Image (cartoon, rainbow, N blue to C red):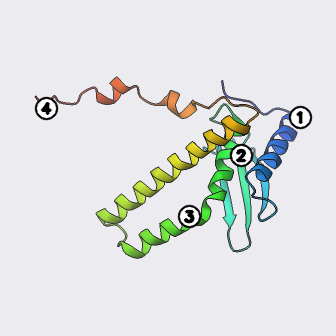
Amino acid sequence: MIVEIRGKEDKMELERLFDKWCKKLRLTPQWDVKLELVQDPKWKKTGDFKIDPTDRKAILMLNVANPKQENMEEVIVHELMHIKMYPLDQVCESLIVNNFEEGTNGYNFAYQQFFENLEVTVEELTKCFLLEFGENRSLSYGRCAKGKSFNELYDGLKSIG
């Protein structure tokens, strides 16, 4: 079930959850973070953020037109966790850019591994915080539900033996 954001009460609830998690994750008062509710039905993501690390400002964007996740609290925590981890994100990315030539196998491998592991780490931290402090502790399975089953992934592969 995908949540629908309909009225002013739903938007006020998202603002309340956003404020709660900014404090819980100790983003504020060090950072100025605001919530932007995206009404564009063409926007494909459920959540994203824009960041200015020099000025310590960030905008968390939430898709309220057609979110792909069931638990918007989970999306808020996930995106805020990206902001929390942004300094480490930038160090890792700088190491890749400065040690590999763009377009090489090493560069592509390092970038893929970095982004996959960043996403896994952010998601695991999100689950931990959500399960400990969340009001809605149910996890979203939207992306998983649309994926292929284990058997579908391996259909058509040739037997080694």
Q: Identify the amino acid type marked 3.
A: Leu
In front of the other: 92 or 132: 132
Q: Are marks 3 and 2 in contact (CB under 8 Å)?
A: no
User: Residue drawn at (45%, 57%), measured in percent from left and top?
Assistant: 114
Residue on which the image places disc 3: 88
Q: Name the N-terminal-most of marks 3 and 4.
A: 3
Q: Which image quadrant for residue 154?
A: top left
Q: Is residue 51 visible in the rendered structure shown here? A: yes
Q: Name the N-terminal-most of marks 4 and 2.
A: 2
Q: Name the N-terminal-most of marks 1 and 4.
A: 1
Residue on which the image places disc 2: 62
Query: Gap between marks 4 and 2, in whole Å?
Result: 46 Å
Left or right side of 132 for 88: left
Query: Gap between marks 3 and 2, in whole Å?
Result: 23 Å
Mark 2 nearby-residue class (10 Å; few <14, some 14–19, many ≥20): many
Up the image or down, 148 lies above or below 45; here it is above
Residue on which the image places disc 1: 9
Q: Secondary structure at mark 1?
A: helix
Q: Nearer the viewer, mark 3 or mark 4?
A: 3
Up the image or down, 98 lies above or below 106; here it is below
Q: Which image quadrant for residue 30?
A: bottom right
Could you say where residue 135 lies in the image, as x and y percent from the top left? 76, 33
Mark 3 nearby-residue class (10 Å; few <14, some 14–19, many ≥20): few
Q: Identify the amino acid type marked 4.
A: Ile
Q: Secondary structure at mark 2?
A: strand
Query: Gap between marks 1 and 4, in whole Å?
Result: 58 Å
Q: Is residue 36 visible in the rendered structure shown here? A: no
Left or right side of 35 for 152: left
Q: Secondary structure at mark 3?
A: helix
In front of the other: 130 or 95: 130
Mark 4 nearby-residue class (10 Å; few <14, some 14–19, many ≥20): few
In front of the other: 153 or 91: 91
